[in-house]
Image (cartoon, rainbow, N blue to C red):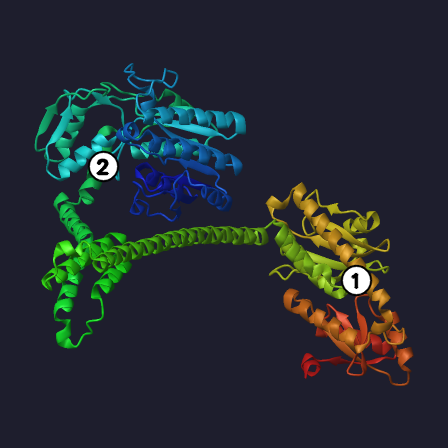
Amino acid sequence: MHVLITGGYGFIGSFVAERFHKEGHQVYIIDNLASGRKENVTVPHKFYNLGVEDERCDEIFHSIKPDIVVHLAAQVDVAVSMREPRQDAQTNILGLVNMLEMSSKYNVSKFIFASSAAVYGMNEQVPLTELMNTEPLSPYGINKLLGEVYCSKWNDIYQLPTLCFRFSNVYGPRQGTIGEGGVVSIYMQQLMNQRDLNVFGDGEQTRDFIYVEDVVDGIYRGAIGEHTGIYNLSTNTETSLNELIGILEQLEQVQDVHYLDARSGDIYRSSLDNTQIKKDLDWLPLYSIREGMEKTHAWFRDHHTPVAADRQAEQPQGYRHWFALLRPYAENLLAFALIVFLTRYGSHWSISADIDFKLVYILVLGVVYGARQSVISAVLSSGLFFYEALANGRDWQSMLYDPEALFMLAIYLFFGLVVGFVSDKHKRESVYIHNELAAEKERYTFLSHIYRDTRKIKEELQRQLIGSKDSIGRIYTITRKLESLESEEVITASMDVLENLLDTRHISIYSVNESNHMRLLVQSRQAGFMLPKTIHLDDEPHFRQVIDTRNMWINKDMEPNIPMYSMPVVHDDQVIALISLHEPSFEHLNMSYENRFKVSVDMISASLARAFRYEGATRQDRYVDDLPILKEAAFAQLLRTREEARKLHNSDYSLLILQREQRTFNELVMLVDSIKRDSDHLGMLNGLPVLLLSHATIAEAQLVIQRLHQYGVSADLQMEEALYA
């Protein structure tokens, strides 16, 4: 099955991905990496970096066609839901509705939703059953309860099978410090960092702690089962914080435990009844609190990173932040200092005094940094202009009425504002274009991944369509061999078709004539499978029955040494051949196999009839002067067919060169045609008349030569070396 896991890189989701992979299913993950980590999942899977509310999820569903959706993506911090309820609703409601809509649209067989014990609120009547009143106290709990309603209604309205699990306090490896089971991970991290443990209250408050692998087992059983509805997923066991700390003290040295004032709104006792899930899903929690804590502690010990190292890593980032903020101002001051220097001493280096470096300064700062720095540079340039005027003996009061001075001041300020505005506008447009380009690149990359996934699935389906034993594609590929218009090619191809369609190497095809004999045309090439080349019908009544009734015969008495199935090939109301199936395997003794054999022979009959009609219509092009002897081109085609039959099915043949002697060509052809077998053929080869003996060894060919000699016809055996030389 294709299993899509939202939030698959998270704490619970990563374990769910591993479980479904171990059970042989293909895993796909949607995660926006807000709290999940890629390194959590090491099993083969396909990842899509999206939020569950993103409309592009439609492309994912369309591509992979998931059978199961396990919706674990959520905003799980109760404090955040209280502080930012809109953000909580966006993920926990809009994201859920999007997943439900996609699941019903693409016919998902089971949708699993991760709910929470938070829906019960302050109810301390333990254990809590699924039928008790729900009074959530936070937007997080409200949205989880609303999610259950959505799932239930989607089941009723859209017939989408939904299953909701109310998790108790889940704990285990890879867990963060946020969420309802976070007290375990918080204590683990404090132990790793050798810090004291804090307990809010007297420590006798209880929680229903459940190990993550027990949760995953419940999810898996729910996915493959048929049940829908709402279930508590818990251990139905109360564990106090003091008991939890006692277990931790046996695993790691605890520095100290501080008992603080109880927090308002905290539930004192909590435990969920799991009777219903144990009954319906045949599920039981396998890990005790001590076993689960031991595995959790071992993981935290192996993956512990000291806090000091994190702080050292954070410090350079703060320095870089401040440096980035102050850098434009520092460079502005340095540039202004350079302008002051050039203004005062530029003439000593033959720098033209006609150049107003202040305008250049404003232009450069505006282009590089935008309006803020260009305005500052304009103000500094104006100040420098006044300073130079005062240094040259001008009175500042007179400058206030000097149009030239006021004009220069206006030029600097206007130039600074215009350059800054144009630069900022250009940067905004560049940023907008850059963002649009980045978004299109991201969309292109996303659709490329979807395209590759879709192509991969398509190719896999094509391989299955063509390669599976009973697939239409495979049957079509096999039966195309019967499209030849040469009867000999059809007979040779018939053996391959029957062997492949019937999955056996015990097939025989006999020709039937009016002489009360059957002659072997071709048989399967199988060690130990030997059949007589000629059968007298009086000795085989079951074959006579097939020919007389023209119906399939079945060896219902399981008589040895005779075929299990025999079927006639009929042309122009005459039985021309008999196809038999010998020694089928036990599992093939059923009605379906009989029908497959009958349909296969019917196809061969139709192909032979078409070939005979073609050969009759082209007789003038195939035979010499309307004599029963093939022209060289037609006879060469027949030889190629017989050579292929010999290679594939060990079907022998021999060639005899006929001598005319005192007879005319016509007399020779008519005489040999009257005494040859129906399965033999006359033809022209290298300008000489030859006789092709079907299923004849060299010793048998010598007997035919003797028989021809009795009728006054001389014949020589054509050796294969001479033929191909």
Would residue 421 appear left or right of 582 to someone viewing this image? left
For the residues carrying marks 2 and 1, which lies nearer the camera in this image?
2
Would residue 151 appear left or right of 535 to someone viewing this image? left
Q: Is residue 533 visible to the viewer in this orientation of the structure?
A: no
**In the rendered image, the vertical position of residue 350 relative to residue 552, given as above or below:** below
Q: Nearer the viewer, residue 300 or 654?
A: 300
Q: Is residue 626 visible to the viewer in this orientation of the structure?
A: yes
Mark 1 lies on a secondary structure that is helix
Q: Position of residue 71 (x, y in %)?
A: 40, 35
Q: Single out the residue that lies furthest toward the left.
A: 255
Mark 2 vs mark 1: which is more N-terminal? 2
Residue designated by label 1: 611
Tally of numbered tags? 2
Q: Which disc, if any, is residue 296?
A: 2
- What type is the residue that disc 2 sits on? Thr
Mark 2 lies on a secondary structure that is helix
- What type is the residue that disc 1 sits on? Ala
Would residue 205 appear left or right of 707 to someone viewing this image? left
Q: Position of residue 279 (x, y in %)?
A: 40, 22
Q: Which residue appears at 24% of the width and 18% of the height? A: 269
Q: Residues within 10 Å of mark 2 (few under 14, many from 20)?
A: many
